Image (cartoon, rainbow, N blue to C red):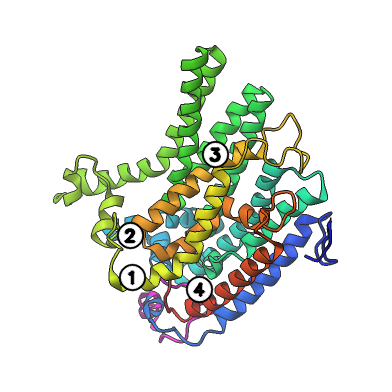
Amino acid sequence: MSQRPGKLTTSRFLRLDSPVGSLTVAFLLWKFLLFVVVALCPGPGYDTSTSLLLHENAQSINKPLDGLSWPLKFARWDSIYFLPIAEKGYVFEQEWAFGYPRILSLVASAIRPSGGLTGPENMALIGLILSHASHYYSVLALYSLSTNIFGDDTPAQKLICFLSAALHIISPAGAFLSAPYGEPVFSLLNFVGLDLYTLSLIAEHRRSALLRDLQVLAAAVVFAIATVARSNGILSGCLFAYDAALLVWASLTQGLTIYNLRHLAVTLVGGCIVATGIIVPQILAFNEYCVQSPEPRPWCQSQVPSIYSWVQRHYWNVGFLRYWTLSNVPLFALAAPMLFVLYKSSLWALKAPPTLGSKSTGVKSSQMSPGAMLIRLALPQVLLTVLAVTTYHVQIVNRIASGYPVWYWWLVSTAMPSFQDSRNSRRGLQRAAQAMVAYALIQAVLFGSFLPPA
């Protein structure tokens, strides 16, 4: 982005009149670069776990194990669990920590209904196709979501939306958005869900009750599927809880109306739909390990039996402050920049005045103001940040944050005159983008060599 004093301009390579085309070219170039970096990493890498995926297949056809094929170069870390689960189903208890293989299995079944394509290499290839397609459409979904917030009538508005989507292309999630992982699928689903949710807010502002209700329920279904892909999708349920609280407060202070009662009922139903994304897998696991099993597992006796909580705690040592050990200090340091960005962007959104952008970006009076929507959309990100610091394996925040939009908007806001704080400048966005590119490329080398951080 080039600039002149007092005037917002763009380079000849950045066509705001054709955002989809420009984003597509940028996406293809970036993905090609990452693909080359990962594919050229030598051998099986530091860890030979990926090669074990080939062992059973090689034994069955009496073929020796050779070097890894290029699809399996992307089978690193958790994906060595994902591929067998997607192909054969859940075999071991600890595999129930992962929901993404369910979606990968459904996609694989749709691609090869006759079962003609089997084996870890083909499953890895399907996973790569799914991840690349999901990431591409999540870029477009973020652009669409951004237009709901900021509009796209003026060059400034279009630039905000374009740069936000472009940042998602070079997200610090890097190779994890190309590999058979849940992050690109989650990003797509979460952005589509937020797109529908913000459209419902606009419909509510225009008093289009039927359209609002349909969009609320559609958003809830998408969030439920996102929760299956990654459990942190359940955090989007706080959007429905927030709206329900506002409606209850309005009813208590202004009196109960049929219109508000209907809105509250739909919102509560939407929240319940989101919860099914995490409840249904628990019911399936309870039936398998507690009802049908001759030796029920220890978690079956819990007050609220949850295989997910048990597996995360028992096998992966996930829990409140469990990761706060001296040996994990380097991982907290690695996650610190992203945690800082999440923190600052959350404060920016939560403190946004209701009229943010209404004059400077030309938001129409029939549309809910950006500030009012930003406050809502910041809530899941705030919860994610708190959980990342206190409960998760903190380094994964660099990749799971890719599916949350507020921090992209905050980075862009530092470069936009209409939102700019006097202490910020366009250099902040440029440096952030450069840091994201550098981190993603270094991470791609480490990922391809099966080296941490993961």
Q: Which residue sits at x=53%, y=65%?
A: 173
Q: Which residue sits at x=67%, y=36%?
A: 355
Q: Nearer the viewer, mark 1 or mark 4?
A: 1
Q: Which residue is mark 4?
A: 74
Q: Is residue 369 left or right of residue 237?
A: right
Disc with the residue nearer the chain's start (1 vs 3):
1
The answer to whether residue 115 is visible is no
Task: State yes or no: discs 2 and 1 in contact (Cβ < 8 Å).
Answer: no
Which three-letter amino acid code belongs to the residue tagged 2? Answer: Glu
Up-down relation of residue 13 to residue 232 (above or below): below
In the image, which disc is placed on residue 376?
3
In the image, which disc is placed on residue 328?
1
Numbered disc 3: secondary structure: helix
Q: Is residue 358 left or right of residue 180?
A: right
Which three-letter amino acid code belongs to the residue tagged 3? Answer: Arg
C-alpha distance separating marks 4 and 2: 19 Å
C-alpha distance separating marks 3 and 4: 36 Å
Q: Which residue is mark 2?
A: 95
Disc with the residue nearer the chain's start (2 vs 1):
2
Disc with the residue nearer the chain's start (4 vs 2):
4
Which three-letter amino acid code belongs to the residue tagged 1? Answer: Asn
Numbered disc 4: secondary structure: helix
Numbered disc 2: secondary structure: helix
Which three-letter amino acid code belongs to the residue tagged 4? Answer: Phe
In the rendered image, which quarter is residue 273 located in? top left
Q: Which residues are magenta?
A: 53-77
Q: Which residue sits at x=33%, y=70%?
A: 328
